[in-house]
Amino acid sequence: MDLSKIPNIKHTDSDNFFLLSGPCAIEGEDMALRIAEQVVNITDKLEIPYIFKGSFKKANRSRIDSFTGIGNEKALKILRKVSETFQIPTVTDIHEVSDAQMAAEYVDVLQIPAFLVRQTDLVVAAAETGKVVNLKKGQFMSPESMKHAVTKVTDCNNKQVMVTDRGTMFGYQDLIVDFRGIPTMREFAPTVLDVTHSLQQPNQSSGVTGGRPDMIETIARAGIVNNVDGLFIETHFDPANAKSDGANMLDLAHLEKLLSNLTAIRKTVRSL
């Protein structure tokens, strides 16, 4: 993947990690613009290539009464507005083959959720749009097996593909990051570490996923030390009242300090 070919991406010559960050789900226009503005200001200051992240719908929910979105077209138009307002690229996840072409009209990167990364038709549909494809490693998959998911994209004559590790199931209600997988997956494609989803505690009896946001910096630091190309961090100005994944999101107030620390670590690692 050539990061510089992503429309509107900045700071690609800074030798820094790139960042996919934003709320878990698009809850409304004001919240999306508010989050994007703050992250843009931070990443410009630190010269971090930045892609705004927001799900236009949430299909993977434990309970039928969980928040799934504000409407597909409405949310996608908000993602487009974020892109146009701040001149930044955007990424959203898709869940069905029909989502691929629809979402491609509004965003720059199509993300395949971890539970769906083995779904060949979905991966191929994303690849055939010509957009960048972000493949999230299944919690049940080995790093080595992601080679085949990447091949599904490249065989469609689309070389713009990245892989994201979001942790591996550790028992029924926890995840663990195996950092040995990062160099393995980097052999196939640029590799991102999804810091916040790696700290989820799924399958709770309440039907609401838990999390360990107190461990975000620990996991992120380890990712940078182990040469990840990018980081994925969901953030919100009010995680406790976020409509999705509030238990593991980073409070937006803490993002600048975290990214400053990680940028310093990156410079040290690159100097060795």
Image (spheres, rainbow, N blue to C red):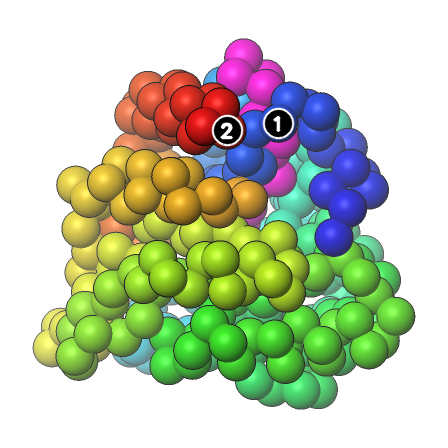
Q: Which mark is residue 15?
A: 1
Q: Secondary structure at mark 1?
A: loop
Camera-nearest residue between 181 and 73:
181
Proximity of marks 2 and 1: CB atoms separated by less than 8 Å:
yes
Residue beneath disc 2: 270
Q: In whole angstroms, how far apart are the C-alphas of marks 2 and 1? A: 9 Å
Q: Helix or strand or loop: what does disc 2 sit on?
A: helix
Q: Position of residue 254 (x, y in %)?
A: 29, 25
Q: Quadrant of residue 63?
A: bottom left
At label 1, counting other C-alpha atoms closer than 10 Å, the crowd grade (few under 14, some 14-19, many 20 or more) is some
Specify whether residue 217 is painted magenta.
no
| Left or right placement of residue 269 versus residue 129 in this view | left
Q: Is residue 177 above or below residue 234?
A: below
Q: Nearer the viewer's eye, disc 2 or disc 1?
A: 2
Percent from the top left, x then y, of residue 186? 57, 58
Sequence-first tag of 2 and 1: 1
What residue is at 50 percent from the left and 29 percent from the top?
270
Which quadrant holds the C terminus?
Answer: top left
Residue, far front: 272
Badge 2: residue crowd in 10 Å (few <14, some 14–19, many ≥20): few
Specify the farthest residue to the top: 45
- Span of residues in magenta: 44-55
User: Residue flagged by tag 1: what amino acid is it?
Assistant: Asp
